[in-house]
């Protein structure tokens, strides 16, 4: 996304490596899946598609459909969701000065789950720019929960961090258990349970390129907005009072950061359900690599999150074909041990 | 609803109900072993029955004992008169044992309720039969067993003989026909990774009996969630939707045909996408055979002259 300032060879090196890693994981995600396609066929197919080259198809017509209409949007979706969750994680960890903060810290998981469950259970049949009721209502639920949390925490001209965290926890719990209640009221032959449960565990679901266009626009703008606030975020991580002394408009910047974080998380939820761990893990790993300054941390974490989720989604699609595994299981299984190993290896006192 | 079935039910009500009510049934005391392996002994046919599953309600009616149901689960809606039975019990996540005990039933029919709930009811002295057939033959056996328990073995015999005869007729009609590749979709709330019928369970078994080859016959269980890539690659010749008239996220043939990348599937190109009512394929009851006949007619129209 954005290059680091000149004169920081370590950051420049890290960025080049991260870009290569992301490119490699995207290639891997495109090359493998539940269905095995020959790599040379894929190259010829793509050249035919892009450059109008005329290789005679040595592949079946449905192989092109699998590659272009199903697999590539999915890989791109995983990259966008990973970048969005990692950026939201950076924003919330910086704002809340809490290493356990993740994109869902301010009530989003409960709100999105409730919206998504309503999408599953209501008799709705509409779509908006390629999105079906479940992602649309999940997105709305995420934003509603976050605004509810902010307005509950707000009083006397400010929204204290601790109050925000506690309100987020309570709102998320209430809305999350409302999902269980809805399921109890509506479950015929236990059919809804695996559907909603699977969605709650997260899974990239992109069926139209138009969905990606919208998501990329929203995520890109929100990431840019976060990067413009990098100095505020650096100052806020020293504490609100210090930030105030440094001349930062603390309350209004906080509001903007929360808004940007909600947009990032909402877009991620709409494309992928509730994927855990990426938004917690990617910012921490990146901080170990490039340090805590947000100007570098934000874009680097986005690259890490994108590469990581593309790989996790590849495993979700390819590990047990034809069965698909919810990607949230893999983000925890793959990312968790790696994160613990990194923590042990660095042995640093941890600081957000 | 087909008129033959109403007539069958009516005939069986007359056949079966009369002896059960009028005279001391023969064959009692009767011991039966249910699908949990538990043996229960009945001194006489039960008169106050609680059914905790729509399929079991349906079987009870088909055997002519619907008027002995004193409570059903909240989803029992077939035959239509089952909708009028009160009280209607919530069974998810667990039935209310308190409520059931207070109704003083002399038989509780349970399909998939938890072992704990069943044990609790049994410890209160309630006879509970766990009737959870996993395939067509098991359903036939269970219906016959219930006929015996209800004191109407003739009704059990009549209902199951009809099921078996019609099943055999379908199987022999399609025996030497080419078996089309069939994809059966159960739910596609996320259309790029639908839940589909695997090899076991009623869904998958009816595809086999109807003379089709299930493209997901290699899944490990009854149901699986698969990626769209695999569906396109396995190129089904017939697509059967059981989620077209679900109350939530219904999928119509037109929506399925419009899914990205699905245009290359043979069934989509030939317009061979059909929707069927899920209840005929998932409810363990006498109507399974109707689902089988309908499915076989879709897969092999040439083998079943239109009436």
Image (tube, coloured by chain):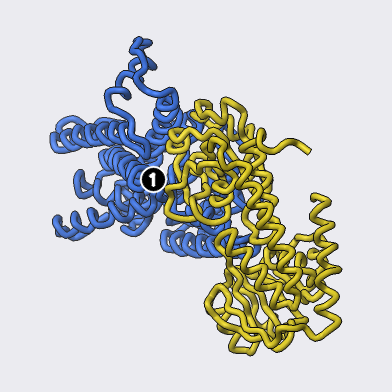
Chain colours: A blue, B yellow
Q: Secondary structure at mark 1?
A: helix
Left or right of A247, for residue A176 = right
What quarter of the picture does the N terminus of chain A occupy? top left
Is any part of residue A16 visible from this angle?
A: yes
What quarter of the picture does the C terminus of chain A occupy? bottom left
Residue A69, image quadrant: top left
What residue is at 73 percent from the left and 71 percent from the top? B72
Residue B79, image quadrant: bottom right
What residue is at 83 percent from the left and 67 percent from the top? B13
Is any part of residue A247 visible from this angle?
A: no
The residue to which callout 1 is attached is: A85
Q: Nearer the viewer, residue A247 or A333?
A: A333
What residue is at 75 percent from the left and 83 percent from the top? B26
Residue B209 pos. (x, y %)? 57, 48
Left or right of B27, for residue A350 = left
Q: Nearer the viewer, residue A68 or B168?
A: B168
Left or right of B20, for residue B140 = left
Q: Is residue B219 above or below residue A38?
A: below
What residue is at 41 percent from the left and 50 percent from the top? A326
């Amino acid at each position: 996304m954005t290059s680091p300032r000149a004169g920081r060879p370590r950051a420049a090196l890290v960025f080049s490596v991260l870009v290569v890693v992301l490119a490699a994981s995207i290639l891997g995600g495109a090359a493998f899946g539940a269905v095995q396609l020959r790599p040379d066929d894929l190259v010829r197919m793509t050249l035919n598609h892009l450059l109008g080259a005329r290789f005679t198809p040595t592949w079946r017509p449905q192989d092109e459909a699998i590659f272009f209409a199903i697999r590539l949007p999915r890989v791109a979706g995983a990259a966008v969701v990973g970048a969005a969750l990692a950026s939201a994680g950076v924003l919330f960890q910086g704002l809340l000065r809490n290493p356990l903060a993740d994109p869902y810290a301010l009530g989003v998981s409960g709100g999105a789950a409730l919206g998504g469950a309503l999408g599953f259970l209501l008799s709705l049949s509409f779509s908006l720019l390629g999105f079906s009721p479940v992602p649309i209502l999940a997105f709305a639920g995420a934003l509603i929960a976050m605004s509810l949390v902010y307005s509950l925490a707000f009083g006397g001209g400010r929204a204290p961090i601790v109050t925000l965290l506690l309100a987020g926890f309570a709102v998320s719990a209430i809305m999350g258990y409302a999902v269980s209640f809805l399921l109890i009221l509506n479950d015929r032959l236990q059919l809804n349970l695996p559907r909603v449960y699977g969605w709650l565990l997260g899974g990239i679901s992109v069926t139209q390129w138009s969905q990606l266009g919208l998501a990329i626009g929203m995520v890109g703008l929100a990431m840019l907005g976060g990067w413009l606030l990098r100095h505020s975020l650096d100052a806020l991580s020293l504490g609100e009072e210090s930030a105030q002394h440094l001349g930062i408009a603390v309350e209004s910047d906080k509001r903007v950061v929360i808004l940007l974080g909600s947009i990032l998380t909402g877009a991620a939820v709409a494309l992928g359900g509730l994927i855990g761990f990426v938004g917690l893990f990617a910012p921490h790993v990146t901080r170990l690599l490039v340090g805590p300054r947000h100007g570098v941390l934000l874009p680097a974490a986005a690259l890490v999150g994108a590469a990581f989720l593309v790989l996790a989604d590849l495993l979700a699609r390819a590990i047990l074909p034809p069965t698909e595994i919810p990607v949230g299981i893999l983000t925890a299984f793959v990312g968790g041990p790696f994160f613990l190993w990194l923590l042990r290896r660095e042995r640093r006192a941890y600081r957000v | 609803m087909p008129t033959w079935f109403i007539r069958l039910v009516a005939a069986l009500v007359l056949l079966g109900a009369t002896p059960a009510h009028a005279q001391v049934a023969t064959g009692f005391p009767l011991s039966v072993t249910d699908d949990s392996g538990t043996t229960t002994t009945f001194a006489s046919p039960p008169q106050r029955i609680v059914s905790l599953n729509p399929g079991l309600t349906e079987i009870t009616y088909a055997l002519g004992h619907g008027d002995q149901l004193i409570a059903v689960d909240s989803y029992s809606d077939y035959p239509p008169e089952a909708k009028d039975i009160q009280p209607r019990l919530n069974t998810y996540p667990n039935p209310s044992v308190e409520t059931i005990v207070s109704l003083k039933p002399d038989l509780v029919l349970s399909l998939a309720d938890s072992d704990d709930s069943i044990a609790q009811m049994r410890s209160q002295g309630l006879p509970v039969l766990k009737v959870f057939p996993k395939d067509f033959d098991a359903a036939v056996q269970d219906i016959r067993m219930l006929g015996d328990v209800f004191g109407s073995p003739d009704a059990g015999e009549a209902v199951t003989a009809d099921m078996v005869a019609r099943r055999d007729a379908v199987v022999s009609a399609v025996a030497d026909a080419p078996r089309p590749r069939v994809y059966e979709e159960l739910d596609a709330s996320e259309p790029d990774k639908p839940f589909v019928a695997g090899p076991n369970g009623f869904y998958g078994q009816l595809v086999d009996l109807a003379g089709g080859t299930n493209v997901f016959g290699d899944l490990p269980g009854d149901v699986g969630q698969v990626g769209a890539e695999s569906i396109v690659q396995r190129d089904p010749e017939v697509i059967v939707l059981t989620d077209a008239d679900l109350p939530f996220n219904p999928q119509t043939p037109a929506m399925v045909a419009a899914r990205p990348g699905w245009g290359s599937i043979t069934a989509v190109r030939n317009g061979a996408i059909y929707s069927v009512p899920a209840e005929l394929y998932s409810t363990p009851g006498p109507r399974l055979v109707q689902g089988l006949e309908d499915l076989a007619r879709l897969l092999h129209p040439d083998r079943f002259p239109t009436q």
